[in-house]
Amino acid sequence: MILPIGPIHPGLKEPLRLNLKTEGEKVIKAEIDYGYVHRGIEKIMEGKTWQKCIYLSERICGICSYEHTQTFAETLETISGVQAPLRAQYLRVITNELDRIQSHLLANSTFFKTLDHETLFMHVLALREYAMDSLELLTGNRVNLGWNVVGGVRMDADERHFNAILENLKKIEDGFDRHIALFEEAPIVALRAKGVGVMTKEEAIKGHAVGP
């Protein structure tokens, strides 16, 4: 069976056309057509300064924007033989992981919204706010952080920042612990999600999987 989805669909974040080949509820193959959503970012960057390019790279995706600037900065650092200070490298890792957390929480909350599970949708979205607050505390922004530059990051952080971030992470962890049974056992979630879409490391590398 071929199941067409899009280009406009309540489960999609932006216009996108999917043709899914399915067997029952199992997706065997997917044909993806981005259409005019594909913006040609690489071409736009040609001939521009790195400052303009890193600004543009952060706007590739509004949900996981940070990873693109870190990739851009580290690529230029490798080409030019520049190495970011060790402290800046650690700050990048912390920021990257916080951005990964908020991105996964948003993706999962959207999944629950699609399933019409309003309780988990609101709960997971509320947990995401702790990660967003941590990013704002560390970088000054919640989205499009403007944090990376070639050679490091824009600002330093101190113990106050780290203690507040640890407190927020504890709140996220505790929130998950209270609702873990809903993820693992509730029929509306577990039966439709457990073991679905799992990729091995080798499959991810072979398929050029990207994202946080």
Image (cartoon, rainbow, N blue to C red):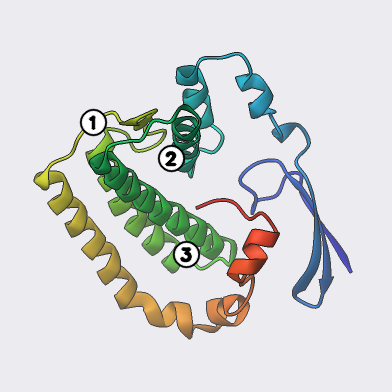
- Image location of residue 66, percent across then percent down: 43, 40
Please tell me how crowded label 1 is: few (under 14), some (14-19), or many (20+) other residues with Cα within 10 Å: few
Q: Residue at x 49, y 83 (%)?
A: 186
- Image location of residue 152, percent across then percent down: 32, 33
- The amino acid at mark 1 is Met
CB under 8 Å between discs 3 and 1: no
Of badges 3 and 2, nearer the viewer stands 2
Mark 2 highlights which residue? 66
What whole-number distance in Å separates the C-alpha atoms at marks 3 and 1? 39 Å
In depth, the one of 200 and 134 nearer the eye is 200
In depth, the one of 49 and 6 nearer the eye is 49
Please tell me how crowded label 3 is: few (under 14), some (14-19), or many (20+) other residues with Cα within 10 Å: few
Q: Residue at x 42, y 33 (%)?
A: 144
**206 lies left or right of 95:** right
**Which label sits on residue 118?**
3
CB under 8 Å between discs 3 and 2: no
- The amino acid at mark 3 is Glu
Q: Give the answer, above or below, for where 180 lies relative to 138.
A: below
Q: Earlier in the sequence, mark 1 or mark 2?
A: 2
In depth, the one of 174 and 73 nearer the eye is 73
Q: Earlier in the sequence, mark 3 or mark 2?
A: 2
Q: Give the answer, above or below, for where 157 lies relative to 103.
A: above
- The amino acid at mark 2 is Tyr
Of badges 3 and 1, nearer the viewer stands 1
Mark 1 highlights which residue? 155
In depth, the one of 190 and 83 nearer the eye is 83
Q: Residue at x 46, y 58 (%)?
A: 104
- Image location of residue 81, percent across then percent down: 43, 31
What whole-number distance in Å separates the C-alpha atoms at marks 1 and 2? 15 Å
Q: Earlier in the sequence, mark 3 or mark 1?
A: 3
Label 2, secondary structure: give it: helix
